[in-house]
Amino acid sequence: MIVVPVALGDRSYDVLVGPGVRSSLASVIPERSRRVAIVTQAGIPVEVDPGREHQVFLMGDGEEAKSLATVEQLCREFSRWGLTRADVVVALGGGLVTDTAGFAAAVYHRGVAVVHVPTTLLAQIDAAVGGKTGVNLPEGKNLVGAFWQPQAVLCDTEVLATLPEREYRSGLGELAKYHFLGGGRLDELPLDERVAACVRIKAEVVGSDEREGGRRAVLNYGHTLAHALETAGHYDLRHGEAVAIGLVYAAELARTLGRIDDERVAEHRRVVSAYGLPSRLPPGVDLDELVELMARDKKAVSGLTFVLDGPNGVEPVTGIDRPVLDQAFEAIRERPEEPA
């Protein structure tokens, strides 16, 4: 077992990484908690034992279930069961579950404890760590939410073997981001160490900027275009696939602005390609719609804002003109195959 601390003063907690760590769940449940509400989905083939009275609450599948309606449903079910402020919610599933159940925990009785047991690679290295919770609106991804730190996060790498291939590859899209946030050649590490390395990077960033007042925005590298693609495409792209496209777009944008050179762009494309992820815009995308959606991004407090690579590393950049956006779009457009 690898233990990665998230240092946040009196809200500090540990992330446990390794095969079988879900068996440690009972040891991280707060002592005062009599009941445990386990939020999961019907198709998740993982069970946990919190060591005390518990009940399973199911939420729907797909991004449509990541909604205020689901949060209301969960809170009403918690209330009917008699969950109190002293009890705890366990989110068992991927990022959709940890985001939604975490937000329900944050608002039920104005906040009850939550423990995350992420079952996908994407959730283990990103969604379940750092306290961001939230749901979607028709207008965009994750527009309603709260910062609510968990009591603990149990990243059981054993369960990743049960993931469908596309779901696992989607997690690699989020992992690709960490290559450019100080992770180096993460693809050369064993799985447990790779997950732990990503968690360490995120924990260090979150510890320095819990509520995204500045530096934490770097964790959204590749996400500005990614969220727009997911919304515009009605979620026919997995999150990690959209992030992969967003990473290459961000690299092309940074090169257009003179922030990075051709070699650095090539490294972005190498990492994305090595993970078998897409690097071009899906056919038929409306660029005007993408720009409009990107303008609604949570980072966009001073106009369109992107997280871009540069001489000082990855950082937020504002004030980018439309012709520059279009030049970078052109670099990632789908092109017909050239004749041999």
Image (spheres, grey):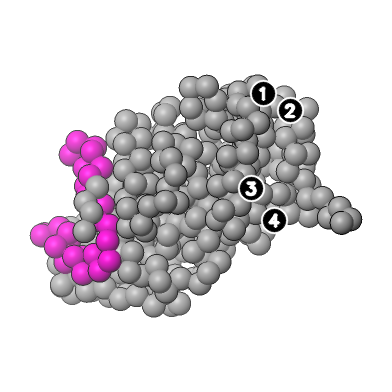
Q: On the rendered image, what quadrant is the N terminus found in?
A: bottom left
Q: In this orientation, which residue lies closer to the viewer: 113 or 107?
A: 113
Q: In this orientation, which residue lies closer to the viewer: 54 or 309?
A: 309
What SS does tag 2 mark?
Answer: helix
Label 3 Cα crowd, 10 Å radius (few <14 / some 14-19 / many 20+): many
**Highlighted range, magenta:** 5-33
Residue 78 shows up from this direction: no
C-alpha separation, residue under disc 3 versus residue under disc 4: 13 Å
Residue designated by label 4: 233
Residue ranking furthest to the left: 31
Query: Do the residues bearing badges 2 and 4 touch, measured as CB atoms within 8 Å?
Result: no
Under mark 3, the amino acid is Ile
**Comes first in the chain, label 2 or label 4:** 4
**Comes first in the chain, label 3 or label 1:** 3
Residue 157 vs residue 97: left or right? left
Residue designated by label 2: 324
Q: Is residue 224 magenta?
A: no
C-alpha separation, residue under disc 2 versus residue under disc 4: 23 Å
Query: Do the residues bearing badges 1 and 2 touch, measured as CB atoms within 8 Å?
Result: yes
Residue 99 numbered tag? none
Q: Position of residue 2 (x, y in %)?
A: 23, 54
